[in-house]
Amino acid sequence: MSVDPLVFRSAMARLATGVTILTTRRGDRHEVMTANAVTSVSLHPTLVLASISSESTWLQAVRCCGRFAVNVLAAHHEDLARWCADHARHEQPEAITRHDVSVSPESGLLLFNDALVTAECRAHAEHLAGDHVLVLGEVIAIDVRDACAEPLVFFDRGYGRVVS
Ligand SMILES: Cc1cc2nc3c(=O)[nH]c(=O)nc-3n(C[C@H](O)[C@H](O)[C@H](O)COP(=O)(O)O)c2cc1C
């Protein structure tokens, strides 16, 4: 018995998630990508996991850099999420610095000042999982920047907000 991958993808699109921008470095250049397959894993030590396509250029960068940051997006970040999932961003690496960003003095990673949360991570382990790689990071610094802001939500291949 097996499941059609397209049916699987459509079904799993019904799982609502938050949206993050993952940042890492390739030399002087900041590499960013949108990811929603991100979750917390462990408290002792503090671990997070991101499931990254094996073909992603971001994966190559994080392997060299050895660290990455998770930026949890707010509801107003929809355009940013679209941009960081668009291959066109590779032709304009400086464009991302026009957003409200800063570079962590400790890790050198790009952080979004108006994210809900930023977490700076040291690469901990990676595991091949089908056509993706599970990248585990040990969180070495975390900042809840806005405890009241609404999160950006991804559901059924579209962006939305939490309605309470
Ligand atoms: C909302 C959203 C969530 C995404 N989540 C993931 C993810 O968790 N893992 C992944 O590998 N790609 C994910 N992507 C796709 C990547 O952002 C996109 O393929 C990106 O261009 C990959 O960057 P690359 O240039 O490093 O390959 C997501 C895209 C969107 C729009």
Image (spheres, rainbow, N blue to C red):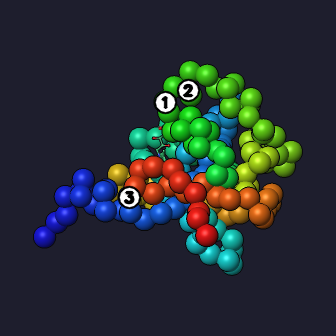
* Amino acid at circle 1: His
Q: Look at the numbered disc 1 and give the secondary structure of its residue.
A: helix
Residue at image position (31%, 62%) is: 11
Q: Say which of marks 3 and 2 sits in front.
A: 3
Residue 52 in percent (x, y) is at 47, 51
39 left or right of 45 in image? left
Helix, strand, or loop for circle 2?
helix
- Mark nearer the viewer, 1 or 3: 3
Q: Quadrant of residue 120?
A: bottom right
Distance of mark 3 from mark 2, alpha carbons?
26 Å
Numbered disc 3: secondary structure: loop
- Could you tell me if the residues under marks 1 and 3 are in contact, i.e. CB atoms within 8 Å? no
Q: For this view, does 152 lie left or right of residue 94?
A: left
Please state, as top left, top right, bottom left or bottom right, where the C terminus lies in the image. bottom right
> In the current view of this chain or complex, which residue is farthest to the bottom?
44
- Label 2 C-beta lies within 8 Å of the nearest ligand 1 atom: yes
Residue 90's tag is 2
Residue identifier under label 3: 13
Of mark 1 and mark 3, the one earlier in the sequence is 3
Q: Quadrant of the N terminus?
A: bottom left
To which quarter of the image does residue 150 belong?
Answer: bottom right
> In the rendered view, would you say 119 is above or below 107?
below
Q: Residue at x 40, y 55 (%)?
A: 156
Disc 1 to disc 2, how far (Cα)? Answer: 6 Å
Image coords of residue 80 (percent x, y): 62, 39
Residue at the left extreme?
1
The residue beneath circle 1 is: 87
